[in-house]
Image (spheres, rainbow, N blue to C red):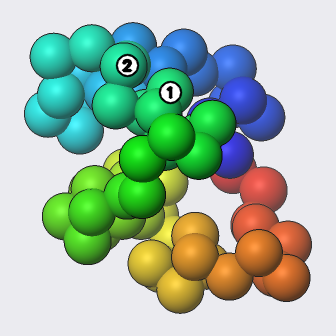
């Protein structure tokens, strides 16, 4: 969703309360597992459910 909306990791990170995009990068590359708080913030930002973000089999809604 982030890439589809042409949103950088830094911009998303700042929008959801992180100083930069490093944590988002680590989650996207699988180096870290996302916290529940992170999933909730991202879901709120993109106006989708946390289930939508966590279920790899679902096609995420277009922005």
Q: Under tag 2, what secondary structure?
A: loop
Rendered image: mark on residue 54: none
Eyeballing the image, is 2 above or below 45? above
Q: Under tag 1, what secondary structure?
A: helix
Residue 57, position in %: x, y?
Answer: 85, 82
Say which residue label 2 marks: 21
Q: For this view, does 45 lie left or right of residue 40?
A: right
User: How many marks can you see?
Assistant: 2
Using the rendered view, name the quadrant where residue 22 is placed. top left
Residue 42, position in %: x, y?
Answer: 38, 54
Residue 56, position in %: x, y?
Answer: 77, 75
Q: Is residue 11 visible?
A: no
Q: Is residue 13 visible?
A: yes
Q: Are marks 1 and 2 in contact (CB under 8 Å)?
A: yes
Residue reaching furthest to the front: 31
Q: For this view, does 53 lie left or right of residue 39?
A: right
Residue 50, position in %: x, y?
Answer: 45, 78
How would you rate the neighbour count of disc 2 (Cα within 10 Å): few for under 14, some for 14-19, many for 20 or more?
Answer: some
At a point 27% along the width and 63% down the height, the residue shown is 35
Eyeballing the image, is 42 above or below 36? above
Say which residue label 1 marks: 25
At a point 58% along the width and 76% down the height, the residue shown is 54
19 or 43, which lies in front?
19
At a point 58% along the width and 70% down the height, the residue shown is 53
How would you rate the neighbour count of disc 1 (Cα within 10 Å): few for under 14, some for 14-19, many for 20 or more?
Answer: some
As measured in the structure, the alpha-carbon distance from the residue carrying label 1 to the one carrying label 2 is 6 Å
Eyeballing the image, is 39 above or below 6? below
């Amino acid at each position: 969703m982030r890439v589809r909306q042409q949103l950088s990791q830094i911009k998303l990170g700042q929008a959801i309360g992180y100083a930069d995009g490093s944590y988002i990068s680590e989650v996207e590359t699988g180096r870290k597992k996302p916290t529940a708080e992170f999933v909730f913030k991202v879901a709120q930002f993109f106006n989708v459910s946390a289930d939508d973000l966590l279920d790899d089999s679902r096609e995420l809604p277009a922005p």
